[in-house]
Image (cartoon, rainbow, N blue to C red):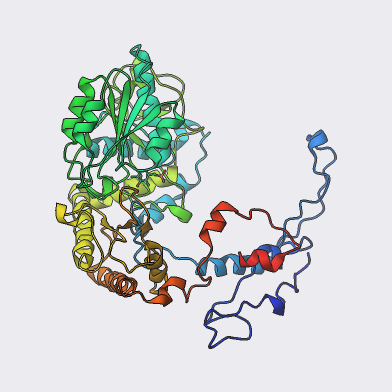
Amino acid sequence: MTINQSGWKPEMAVKGADAAAPTFTGNKALMLEEPLIFEIGSTETTGVDFAEGDVKHDRLGDLTRKAPIGLPGLSEPETVRHYTRLSRQNYAIDLGLFPLGSCTMKHNPRLNERMARLPGFADVHPLQPVDTVQGALGVINELAHWLITLTGMHGVAMSPKAGAHGELCGILCIKAALEARGEGHRKVVLVPESAHGTNPATAAFAGFTVEDIPATADGRVDTAALKARLGPDVAAVMITNPNTCGLFERDLKDISDAVHAAGAYVYCDGANFNAIVGRVRPGDLGVDAMHINLHKTFSTPHGGGGPGSGPVVLSEALSPFAPLPYTARTADGHVHLIEEERTEEFSNEHFGGKLDSFGRMTAFHGQMGMFTRALTYILSHGADGLKQVAEDAVLNANYVLRSLEDVLDAPFGSAGPCMHEALFSDSNLAEGFSTLDVAKGLIDEGFHPMTVYFPLVVHGAMLVEPTETESKAALDQFIGALRSVAERAKAGDASLKSAPHFAPRARLDETRAARKPVLVWKDAEPQAQAAE
Ligand SMILES: *Cc1c(COP(=O)(O)O)cnc(C)c1O
């Protein structure tokens, strides 16, 4: 083993953003600058000390690598420091309010983490005999029961691994149901402008033609336009509720009745269930399929912090087409994992007796760690606590909306209270100032920016979702920060155009990064590449 001594070189010093007080190293205040791993690592270095392998014959034949792979190596302490330093340049929900609208960046309770790490959940293997994983299967089955109960639906597919994956699952159930009815010719999916962007992508991916339905001036789906478009070629409508403007689609029951009368199905994007959990049951609104983001509503980590999980609840009409596998508890208490085909014997409370699965979404049974966390969250809150989750999420968002609408334009502010997120626009900033400048200014004030330029129906949108886990003190601190940045943008403060000034990296050329991404490390131009 070689310990790499030569990683840092003086020319790697990055000059401090604050030119008035540069430091010799380029480091600032207990934060060491971190070059790329390609700059400090060496192919000669490794953190492990293995004896030379004794491989007599490999089975790769022609595919055996001829040249070294060339990946940079570091010793163990260097590796730990490299990634820990990088992590300190990032922002996290464990550091402060994370206002990213539509993402529901709520606190992940440590109790959830404790439960998910119990060896009976953390160390099980998906191919273990069913008798040895009764506890894990019991968790999946019980969570399925809770998701059905909370949504007022009939069945649930637990295996989809994220919201968008759940959308695909729901749309494939709709496709299978239409084909079973001999109506596979229905090829159009209607998507309102106020829906999440993944909705049209899902419908197109599943082979449907997507048609837009306009939004009304108050940010909701234009019900009249939607009804007028229903017809024998329409397979489904995909509605996000609460929608991406942070508003409740009040006409959903009326819309569902019309959609069903026209022979189509209602897909509801339920990623924003956080705002209505315990208060509204989508099943009562005529929904046929809806994904639930466990990583949002039920507080499992997401983003860089963990895999998602997007179970899909289904109406009685769609449940027979749900993907395998599913769990069923028999009267003797045993939990069965139905992987191959449904039988009457295991036509459990979730699915009724029909057996018409469209197939499989994933290799195994879903995200065990997320299931354990979500069930822990549900049980530790109880029915009253979950209801309060929705109430507090809505209360916090309205507090943000009303505290800032005198300084930032709130396009639907006059339409009444919002749901779980507050939407602002760039319309009253000074000439030449944009949403991007406000977002970058917020970084200097200590906060991750809100979601920007989404939803598309609002010009220069800024979507703030505080979630229910923020205290009033945290909300006030954030509101103060955003207010001061907004005031600077309204007053035309030129320094905002080059913000952030205090972040580890200054403002990037994001257009160039998106249009001409540099995806391959080239040794010849290390500094130029590093600057990008
Ligand atoms: C987050 C979100 C999605 C997508 O969920 P993923 O888990 O990121 O795939 C879809 N719709 C809405 C409204 C969302 O907020």
Q: Residue 194 is drawn in which quadrant? A: top left
Q: Residue furthest bottom?
A: 21
Above or below residue 510? Residue 149 is above
Q: Residue furthest front?
A: 431
Above or below residue 261? Residue 495 is below
Residue 99 appears anywhere in the view: yes
Q: Position of residue 210 (x, y in %)?
A: 38, 31
Q: Position of residue 202 (x, y in %)?
A: 42, 34
Above or below residue 124? Residue 41 is below
Left or right relative to 173: residue 232: left
Instruction: Identify the residue at horizontal 27%, vertical 20% (top origin).
Output: 231
* Quarter, ligand 1: top left
Number of numbered tags placed on the structure image: 0
Q: Position of residue 95 (x, y in %)?
A: 40, 68
**Nearest to the observer: residue 113 or residue 275:** 275
Instruction: Identify the residue at horizontal 50%, vertical 46% (top origin).
Output: 123
Q: Position of residue 182 (x, y in %)?
A: 35, 11
Q: Residue furthest right?
A: 56
**Which quadrant is home to the N terminus?**
bottom right
